[in-house]
Image: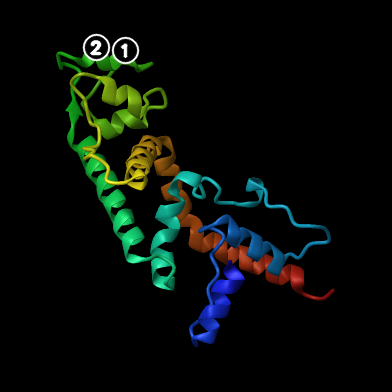
Amino acid sequence: MLAGLNAARLSADKEGWAPARSQAYLGVLVDDLCTLGTKEPYRMFTSRAEYRLMLREDNADLRLTEIGRDLGLVDDERWARFNEKLENIERERQRLKSTWVTPSAEFVADVNAHLTTPLSREASGEDLLRRPEMTYAQLTSLPHLRLRLKMSKPQSRWKSRSNTKGISLVSRMRLKNSYVMRIRCCLPRWIIVWFLVCRTKSLPN
C-alpha cells in the first residue's frame, strides 16, 4: 500500500511519504527495515513500537485520517463522517468537563459507591473518569450524571459504529491521557536520540 501510494505520488511529481514511528505500526516496520535491517523474516510485534500506547486500534482514524485526506486517500464522504465523529467526541468531553459533583451533593453517595476513596472535593465528570475504578458506563449509569452522547438515529451502519467507537474512545481518555501528553512532549528529543543511535550503528568500524 505504501509503495503504491508513493509510486502514484512520484508519478505526479509529488513528494513521497512514510509514517513516523509515532504515527503507525507501518512506520515502525519501515523504519526498522531501513535503519536496522534484518537477517530473518521481519515480524511486527507491538513491543517493537516505543509509542504503542499511542498506536491503539481505537484511535487509528484520529491519527491517520487527516494525513490520508492530505494525501488524497480520503474522499469527501469519509471526511465528513470523520469530522462528525470528532464533533461528537469533543461535545462529550466538554460535557464531562462542565459537569461537577461536590461532596455535599445529594447524590454523592451514588458516586462514592463506585470509588475506592470517597470524594473529598469538587470533581468534574472528567476528573471522575480519570479514576481507575470509574468507567464511562458506570458514570453514565448514575441518575444525576447521564452524560451520554446525543445520538441521532443513524442513517447508516457506519454512523452507528462511529458513535459507538466515539463513546468507547471517550471512555479510554482517562489514566492514559496525562501519560500520552508526556510522551508527545518528549517525542522530538527521542527522535533525535534515535537518529543518532542509528547513525552510530551504521558507521564503519
Q: Is residue 55 rendered to the left or right of residue 157?
A: right
Classify mark 2: residues with Cα within 10 Å, few (<14), some (14-19) or many (20+): some
Question: Residue tagged by mark 2?
Answer: 109
CB of mark 2 within 8 Å of CB of mark 1?
Answer: yes
Q: Which mark is residue 113?
A: 1
Element type where label 1 sits in the image: loop
Of 187 and 65, the residue lying toward us: 65
3D distance between C-alphas at marks 2 and 1: 6 Å
Is 108 situated above or below 190? above
Tag 2: amino acid: Ala
Name the image quarter holding the N terminus: bottom right
Q: Where residue 115 appears, x then y in whole percent?
A: 35, 17
Q: Residue at x 56, y 76 (%)?
A: 6
Per the rendering, the mark at residue 43 is none
Whether residue 102 is situated above or below residue 180 in the rendered picture? above
Q: Is residue 149 left or right of residue 74?
A: left
Where residue 135 sits in the image (x, y, percent)?
37, 26
Quarter of the image containing the C terminus?
bottom right
Asked whether, in this view, residue 72 is left or right of residue 138, the answer is right
Residue appearing at x 41%, y 37% in the figure = 172
Q: Secondary structure at mark 2?
A: helix
